[in-house]
Amino acid sequence: MHAFRFDLTDLPPAAEALRAEVRDFLRAELKDRRRAERADSWGGFDPAFSRKVGARGWIGMTWPTRYGGHERSFLERYVVLEEMLAAGAPVGAHWVADRQSGPLLLRYGTEAQRERFLPAITRGELAFAIGMSEPDSGSDLASIRTRAERADGGYRVNGTKVWTSNAHRAQYLIALFRTQVVPDKKHEGLSQFLVDLAAPGITIRPIIDLGGAHHFNEVVFEDALIPEDLRVGGEGDGWKQVTTELAFERSGPERYLSSFALLLELVRREAERPSERGTVAVGRLVAHLATLRQMSLSVAGMLEAGLNPNLEAALVKDVGTAFEQETPEGVHALLDVEPEPGAGRGDLEEVLGYLVQRAPSFSLRGGTREILRGIIARGLGLR
Amino acid sequence: MSELGTLLADTVTRLFGDLVTKEALEAAEKGAWPEKLWRALEEGGLTLPLVPEAQGGAGGCWEDAEVVVRAAGRHAAPVPLAETIVAGWLLAGAGLEVPMGPLTLAPVRADESLRLARKGAALEGTATRVPWGARAGHVVALAEAGGRPTVALVAAGAARVTPGRNLALEPRDTLVFDGAPVLASAPAAAGLGPDALQVYGALVRAAQMAGALESVLEQAVRYAGERRQFGRAIGSFQAIQQQLAVLAGHVAAAGTAAAHAFRAADRRDPAFEVAAAKVRTGEAAGVGAAIAHAVHGALGFTYEHSLHFATRRLWSWRAEFGSESRWAVVLGRTVLTRGADLLWPDLTARGGA
């Protein structure tokens, strides 16, 4: 009768023991990290930090040990992630590889690719970027035009990717290219590749976001050569693979904690002199937060059980990003503070200034709200 | 779900499916008491899931009870089942016998209180908005005696009644206890505070709302697939699909929030989780009912259509046993007292553990 279900997940004692370990680690590592920097959690890119996380065994946690993984449960991994994000740790240098690129290689990569890339990822030494969108292809991802044509020993690539986060500081990109043009069948003829971003024929240009930050880039391919053995999965299987990959990133704690740093500052300010309306607003936000955490944990539990909770994951992301975008609204409704574009009158003003400008991206990255709701509608049987 | 929970789910779904028909709901709104439904619920062991088997109950836990309460909300069962479940639990917890028949709770409003007089032999005071106050066989009151919350059992006929109703035309009566004889009383189970009726009343309303929201989503999706305009089912339009996706998000959140609160009730003082659940389900009720009506168009606005059995309940239940703002204050006060640095540790210590 119901298209979706969210059974509660109980975290095992091992996960809770791990939580204490992670907290101790973060307390020491982040003691000098400013509150406004913490608001930028998975936007923070710090290779030294990622190597320390890798040394603790907290990257590739669920992967087989023969690839450097630790064969721990999804729930233990979940606890590490939520602690990192709640503390505002700079996880950006291993985030994409741990969440998407590694799992993709585990599922579709060759043995040689796994042996070559996964151990380095688990050590926190290898950062990945994702090459999907193009100047004329955003939500309509299957319309991409960047061509990978057969050439001696591999493929010759021409075209442009955009919004490529961290391309300027990651070593590798996993990109979706068109290996074949099939008239009227745009989902066919797509393939995924591992791209060495330092290879000739690749130019990376910054795209500055509205807040003045450099996270994403334009990546231009001009006769760039990619060896055959860096194709991921079968030629022409790209669409199926890419939709699987996108499902990895919909339900984690990063889908409801992006504005957590602001909620903390709100609580800090309001606790000094609590007002009735402030108490109501904080209570309401915390009700949403507590519920979202259970929804997200529920999906983690289903993943652990080997289920395929695609609809549930899409729901978590849609509800979660709405909450993340509402948090700055809540602050404005409540307090007479002005957002500031950097250090100024206080942490609240700075964190608010940062998140107000970041918030529009929450319902764009990894698939827009409208596309996501289309996926939910399909899950409900409407299309 | 436990074995008992699964058994209860099957029984309750079959029973409500058979007996809570549109005709039965309309009759209940005109004041008829669905005796057949109630008897079937009692015979099926669904009215006292939390009472030990030795005392005639099912000997289950709150997570089992949630199955029954949520289903009652989904089917808009026009009986005080949620109230009876809480009342039976209170009586059994205080070591008192649980009478057969529908039970209700008093007082249900946070700004009202009842007193025991004549050395505990009589109940005094006024309770408004008491569910099925006139129709229930007994009232289970929580009154203060000697500085402790005390559970007192009173025959419903012992109160002076002024009838009232909520928007779903469920009885919400004013009961005046003027020396009403107390049939039995005992201190409430350890750990229960004077606000226990509010907390556990809000708990069951959250699950009822989660159930009603499931019904609302199901009806809206079905209608969107059947209703044709511009030559196709309206559910094929993106504008409708996007709205139903938003509704689904609220239904998912409401169900999760309610389930989380019931699990907490099995483990500890659930006031925090109940507060979160009442706030979250109440908000979902408002948005969910609005979207369901928008999708149903004018047809869903008629008495003829059955959507309103769910939506009028949602509009009523969100305000009963404490509104969203009242529970947000409870939650907000807890968080602000503890301070920003304990928000995350407290949250993770409570849920999923």
Image (cartoon, coloured by chain):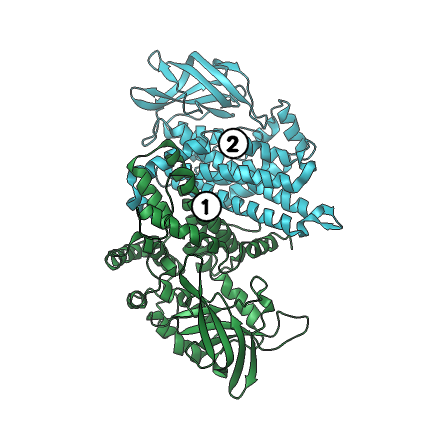
Q: Which quadrant of the figure contains the C terminus of chain A?
A: bottom right
Q: Does the rendering let one see residue B57?
A: no
Residue furthest bottom in the image? A152
Of residues A22 and A319, which is closer to you in this image? A319
Give the image location of residue A154, x and y in percent. Answer: 51, 84
Give the image location of residue B234, x and y in percent. Answer: 69, 48
Q: Residues within 10 Å of mark 1 (few under 14, many from 20)?
A: some
Q: Judge left or right: residue A234 versus residue B121.
A: right
A102 w.r.t. B138: above or below: below
Tell me the element at label 2. helix
> Mark 2 — residue?
B317
Q: Chain of mark 2?
A: B
> Mark 1 — residue?
A326
Q: CA distance from mark 1 to mark 2?
A: 25 Å
Type of the residue with mark 2: Trp
Query: What hue does chain A carry in this figure?
Result: green
